[in-house]
């Protein structure tokens, strides 16, 4: 059994807060009866919103891997944004992203209408890995790699970053694997050590890899790959395709 507001959010209809408003406004019915706040439902129940029956939350869960181009803003609504991620993906179901990327960065973003999956992916204490390919404006040294990997104190955030894994790729390029997601973390870390980031691409989130996905396109995460993602989040995927 699932709380009704969580169920509506899992169907991709709206956020939990918005679902509570729909319920309070009398626009939600369960098995022909007006829904009340706090009630629980299961996939066997008939849930209607504005007299339209919803598909089951389990059957309608969607997980996408999207290769965000530079210039796309990670927000659902922003009148000042040139183009938002919601506009760029243009998916018929309401999706939310798990872990933003700066407008100036590109690469992998996971989008889904499964609110619980997003919460577990975003919870910092879970230490989920995110991998990036970074190009900087100065030659990379052993000292730089060592300092970055041990953690860097970010004065503006008053926090020292967690130890992370770095790999030398080329004269100006390195690969970094983080287990946290502070605001503009990699750019801030590099800046503290006198380096400026020229390009930043996220190539992996947990077990999901960019793996040749063309810029500006997405693919649906299915089967064993999707099951592994849920497993790493401590969840079971009841709608494995």
Image (spheres, helix red, strand yellow):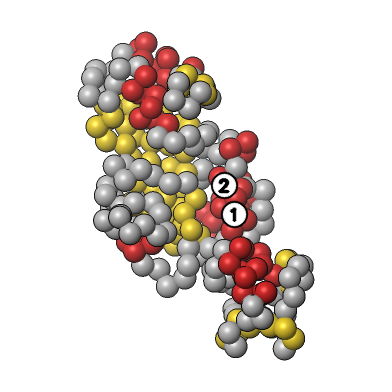
Residue 209 on image: x %, y %: 42, 46
Label 1: how many residues lie within 10 Å, few (<14), some (14-19) or many (20+)? some
Residue at x 66%, y 53% (from the top left corner): 235
Residue 206 on image: x %, y %: 51, 43
Residues marked 1 and 2 touching at CB (< 8 Å):
yes
Q: Tag 2, which secondary structure? A: helix
Give above or below for 23 relative to 226. below
**Residue 144, labelled with which disc?**
none
Residue at x 51%, y 23% (from the top left corner): 158
Specify whether residue 209 is in view.
no
Quarter of the rendering occupied by the C terminus? bottom right
Marks counted in the figure total 2
Residue 176 on image: x %, y %: 41, 29
Residue pointed to by mark 2: 121
Residue 187 on image: x %, y %: 35, 30
Quadrant hosting residue 79: bottom left
Give above or below for 49 relative to 174. below
Residue pointed to by mark 1: 117
Quarter of the rendering occupied by the N terminus? bottom right
Q: Tag 1, which secondary structure? A: helix
Residue at x 59%, y 54% (from the top left corner): 117
* Distance (Cα) linking label 1 and label 2: 6 Å
Label 2: how many residues lie within 10 Å, few (<14), some (14-19) or many (20+)? many
Give above or below for 60 relative to 163. below
Give above or below for 155 relative to 36. above
User: Which residue occupies the extreme top position in the image?
Assistant: 143
């Amino acid at each position: 059994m699932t709380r009704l507001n969580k169920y509506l959010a899992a169907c991709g209809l709206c956020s939990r807060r918005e679902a509570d408003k729909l319920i309070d406004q009398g626009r939600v019915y369960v098995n022909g009866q007006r829904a009340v706040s706090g009630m629980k439902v299961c996939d066997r129940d008939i849930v209607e919103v504005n007299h339209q029956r919803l598909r089951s939350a389990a059957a309608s869960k969607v997980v996408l891997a999207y290769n965000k181009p530079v210039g796309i803003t990670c927000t659902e609504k922003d009148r000042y944004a040139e183009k938002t991620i919601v506009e760029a993906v243009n998916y018929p179901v309401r999706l939310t992203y798990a872990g933003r990327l700066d407008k100036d960065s590109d690469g992998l973003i996971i989008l889904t209408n499964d609110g619980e999956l997003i919460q577990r992916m975003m919870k910092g204490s879970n230490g989920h890995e995110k991998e990036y390919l970074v190009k900087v404006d100065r030659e990379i040294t052993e000292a730089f790699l060592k300092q970055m990997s041990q953690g860097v104190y970010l004065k503006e955030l008053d926090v020292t970053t967690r130890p992370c894994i770095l790999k030398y790729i080329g004269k100006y390029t390195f690969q970094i694997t983080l287990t946290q997601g502070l605001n503009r973390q990699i750019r801030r870390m590099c800046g503290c050590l006198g380096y400026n980031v020229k390009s930043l691409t996220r190539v992996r989130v947990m077990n999901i890899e960019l793996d040749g996905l063309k810029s500006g396109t997405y693919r649906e995460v299915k089967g064993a790959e999707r099951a592994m993602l849920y497993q790493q989040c401590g969840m079971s995927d009841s709608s494995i395709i």
